[in-house]
Image (cartoon, helix red, strand yellow):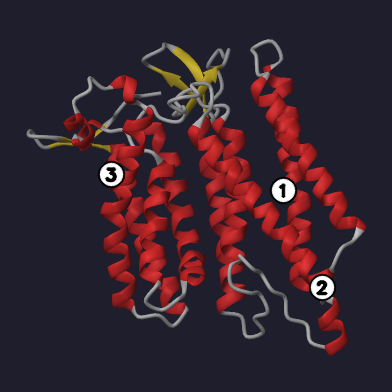
C-alpha cells in the first residue's frame, strides 16, 4: 500500500489524493442531502444552511475526537490539535457533529427524524468514498497476510512502511457502506416518494443503525489502526460506538414489534438469539489470538449476521403485518417509534 500519495504539490502545501477524495465525498453528501430534503418538500436554503453548519462542526469534533484518543502521539501542545494539515480524523467524532447540528436545526420545524432519514444515505455514500479512498493514504489496514503477490486481490495491499502484504479492511468497509447507502435510499423512497407509501418515518435511520453498527463492529476488529479508549486501552472506540448503535436498533425494533403485535414466542426467541449472538461476538473479540484468528472471526461474523437477520425479519414483519388494533379496525398502518 502506498502511503500518502500526493495529488497536487502547490509549494506552500501539498494536497493528497485521500484528502481530495474525502472532499469529493463531502460534496456528494451535501448534494444528496439537499436533494432528499427537497423530496420531503423542504426549503433548499434551509438544507444548505444545515450543510454549511454541519461541515465545520463535524470537522472540529472529528479532529478533537481523534486527538483525544491518540493523545499519546502528541507532545502535549494543545495547538497540535488544530494542525489540520497533519491529518488524523475520527469518523465517530464527525457523526457526533452531524447529530448535534441536526438536533439544533430540527427544533425550528420539529422534523429531526426526517432530517436523519435524509442524512443517512448521504452519510453512507461519503463513508463509502472515504473507505475506498483510504487505499491512497495507507489507512484502514489490518493484519499481515502471507501472500506471494502473484494474483491481484483488491482486499490485499502492499505496505511500503512495513514491507509486507496486509488486509485492506477499507475495501470491505466501502462495500458495506455502499450496501447501507442503497438500502437506506430504498427505504427513504418507500417512505417519502411512493404513491402508496406505508413506511413510517425513521426506517432509513433504523436500517443504518442496525447494518452499519453490526458490520462496523465486525470490521473494526480487523483493523490495526483503530482508536482505543484512553482508560481502557484494549477497547476500540468505534467498535463500542458501533455495537451501541446496533443494540439500540435491535431494542427499538423489538419494542415496536411488541407494540404492533403484542407478545409472542417469536419475539421471545428473537430476544434470546440476539442476546446469545452478542455474547458470542464479545467472547470472540476478547479472546482473539493469532492461533485461532480465522475461526474466531468466522464465529464472530456468523453471530453478528444472525443478529442482523433476526432483527431484519422482525423489522419487516412490523412494517407489513397489521397489529391487533389494526386488525379490529381494518386499517393497516405500521409505526416506527424512535
- Residue on which disc 2 sits: 321
Dot in front, 1 or 3: 1
Would you identify the image quadrant in which residue 205 lies? Answer: bottom right
Residue 308, numbered label = 1
**Residue 322 location in percent, x, y?**
82, 77
Q: Please, which residue is most extreme toward the bottom here? A: 329
Q: Secondary structure at mark 3?
A: helix
Res 280 quadrant in image: top right
Q: How many marks?
A: 3
Mark 2 lies on a secondary structure that is: loop
**In the image, is 187 to the left or to the right of 85?**
right
Earlier in the chain: of badge 2 and badge 3, it is: 3
Task: Work out whether 275 lies above or below 256.
Answer: above
Q: Does label 2 or label 1 sit earlier along the sequence?
A: 1
How many residues crowd around disc 2 within 10 Å: few (fewer than 14), some, or many (20 or more)?
Answer: some
Image position of 141 (left or right of 48): right
Amino acid at each position: 500500500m502506498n502511503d500518502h500519495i500526493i495529488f497536487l504539490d502547490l509549494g506552500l502545501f501539498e494536497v493528497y489524493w485521500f484528502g481530495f477524495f474525502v472532499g469529493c465525498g463531502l460534496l456528494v453528501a451535501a448534494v444528496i442531502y439537499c436533494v432528499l430534503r427537497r423530496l420531503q418538500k423542504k426549503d433548499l436554503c434551509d438544507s444548505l444552511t444545515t450543510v454549511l453548519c454541519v461541515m465545520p462542526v463535524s470537522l472540529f469534533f472529528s479532529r478533537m475526537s481523534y486527538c483525544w484518543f491518540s493523545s499519546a502521539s502528541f507532545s502535549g501542545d494543545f495547538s497540535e490539535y488544530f494542525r489540520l494539515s497533519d491529518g488524523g480524523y475520527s469518523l465517530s467524532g464527525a457523526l457526533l457533529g452531524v447529530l448535534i447540528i441536526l438536533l439544533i436545526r430540527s427544533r425550528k420545524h420539529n422534523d429531526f427524524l426526517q432530517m436523519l432519514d435524509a442524512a443517512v444515505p448521504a452519510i453512507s455514500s461519503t463513508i463509502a468514498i472515504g473507505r475506498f479512498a483510504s487505499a491512497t493514504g495507507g489507512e484502514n489496514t489490518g493484519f499481515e497476510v502471507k501472500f506471494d503477490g502473484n494474483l491481484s486481490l483488491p482486499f490485499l495491499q502492499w505496505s511500503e512502511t512495513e514491507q509486507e502484504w496486509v488486509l485492506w479492511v477499507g475495501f470491505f468497509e466501502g462495500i458495506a457502506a455502499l450496501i447501507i447507502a442503497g438500502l437506506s435510499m430504498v427505504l427513504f423512497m418507500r417512505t417519502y416518494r411512493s404513491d402508496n407509501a406505508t413506511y413510517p418515518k425513521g426506517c432509513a435511520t433504523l436500517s443504518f443503525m442496525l447494518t452499519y453498527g453490526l458490520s462496523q463492529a465486525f470490521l473494526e476488529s480487523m483493523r490495526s489502526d483503530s482508536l482505543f479508549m484512553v482508560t481502557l486501552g484494549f477497547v476500540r472506540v468505534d467498535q463500542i460506538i458501533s455495537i451501541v448503535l446496533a443494540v439500540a436498533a435491535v431494542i427499538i425494533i423489538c419494542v415496536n414489534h411488541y407494540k404492533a403485535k403484542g407478545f409472542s414466542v417469536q419475539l421471545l426467541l428473537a430476544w434470546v438469539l440476539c442476546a446469545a449472538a452478542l455474547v458470542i461476538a464479545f467472547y470472540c473479540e476478547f479472546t482473539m489470538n493469532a492461533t485461532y484468528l480465522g475461526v474466531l472471526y468466522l464465529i464472530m461474523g456468523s453471530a453478528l449476521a444472525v443478529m442482523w437477520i433476526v432483527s431484519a425479519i422482525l423489522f419487516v414483519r412490523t412494517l407489513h403485518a397489521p397489529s391487533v388494533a389494526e386488525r379490529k379496525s381494518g386499517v393497516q398502518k405500521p409505526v416506527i417509534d424512535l
